[in-house]
Image (tube, grey):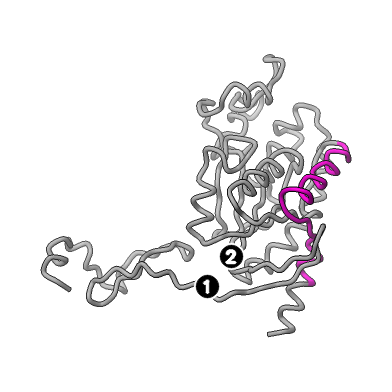
Amino acid sequence: MTKATSARLSPLDEVAADEAPPRPDRQVRWPIEDDGTVNLARPPKPPLTVRLEADPQNVIIDLAKSAVIVIDMQNDFFRDDGWFGLRGVDLSPLFTAIEPINRLLPPMRAAGVPVVWVNWGVRPDGLGLPPNVLHAGNPTGRGLGMGDVHPAKGYNILARGSWGAAVIDEMDTEDGDVRVDKMRISGFWDSELDGVLRNMGVTTLLFTGVNLDRCVMATLEDAAYLGYDCMVVDDCTATVHPEFATQHCHLMIKQLFGFITTSEAISAGMAAMEGRS
């Protein structure tokens, strides 16, 4: 290490390796050589390719550069006493996505694929939400909208850290999963999502969650515009809206934005991959 380099370091920079604080496994840092040189080279991760049956064409993806995006599996959308329930929405269609997602996540984690929970998490005071978002959540102005106080539970609807914004208990979550709050229909707008994914070296996104024709589709479209490879895991998505909404999303995805697969196709592809190893 040069004298110039030594002069810039404080005692805190010289903590012994066994005393260094733990850091997240997926955090990317420049390696420091023994002589103090900062190594800006970023060796690629060994590829972990899997062939998947998909629509409109079969695909090969690299699991080493992939992430599972799970959108809006939250109490305010799934519980009778949550926001959607109080608005009289039929919640039953949403529950079809739970079991397929829970089957998908363990093998993804085992393969080193990050699981990213992207949930509504607005400011309790509603600041950060533009009028068009506030109006969509409460079009009459006399109902219960995002950020408003729940009449019985007392929390702010979909506020970050609240019961309503929390992932439902039925979901298979782990401490090592990544969580990103959003304040728009799209998970990419005015959030950390793009930066988090790029820092993890992710280029392919496997979309799951609810509602397919709203937050899932909007997030997928923005991902495609940003250059990500996009795949919808069909049986791992759901919507409260009529079938034509799903059909429209599938049409647009296949024509413009990416590919559609299933959790069964992913399981079969990973089984074939293991057979090759």
Vertical order, 202 against 71 (above or below): below
Q: Position of residue 48 (x, y in %)?
A: 63, 74
* Quarter that holds the N terminus: bottom left
Foreground residue among 4 and 184? 4
* Quarter that holds the C terminus: bottom right
Vertical order, 139 against 183 (above or below): above
Q: According to the image, label 2 marks what residue?
A: 65
Dot 1: what SS?
loop
Question: In the image, is residue 264 part of the stretch drawn in magenta?
Answer: yes
Q: Position of residue 198 (x, y in %)?
A: 51, 56
Q: Which secondary structure type mostly characterizes the magenta part of the structure?
A: helix
Foreground residue among 261 and 158? 261
Q: Residue at x 66, y 26 (%)?
A: 152
Quarter holding residue 163 = top right
Q: Position of residue 241 (x, y in %)?
A: 83, 36
Question: In the image, is residue 149 part of the stretch drawn in magenta?
Answer: no
Quarter holding residue 12 = bottom left
Q: Which mark is residue 64?
A: none
> How far apart in space, not on screen, are marks 2 and 1 (Cα)?
8 Å
Write the start and end of the magenta stretch as one range.
242-268
Of all residues, the one furthest to the right in this rendering is 243
Tell me whether circle 2 and circle 1 mark residues in contact (CB < 8 Å). Answer: yes
Compare marks 2 and 1 and give the one earlier in the sequence: 1
Dot 2: what SS?
helix
Q: Position of residue 36 (x, y in %)?
A: 23, 71
Residue 1 left/right relative to 163:
left
Residue 68 left/right relative to 129:
right
Q: According to the image, label 1 marks what residue?
A: 45
Q: Amino acid at mark 2?
A: Lys
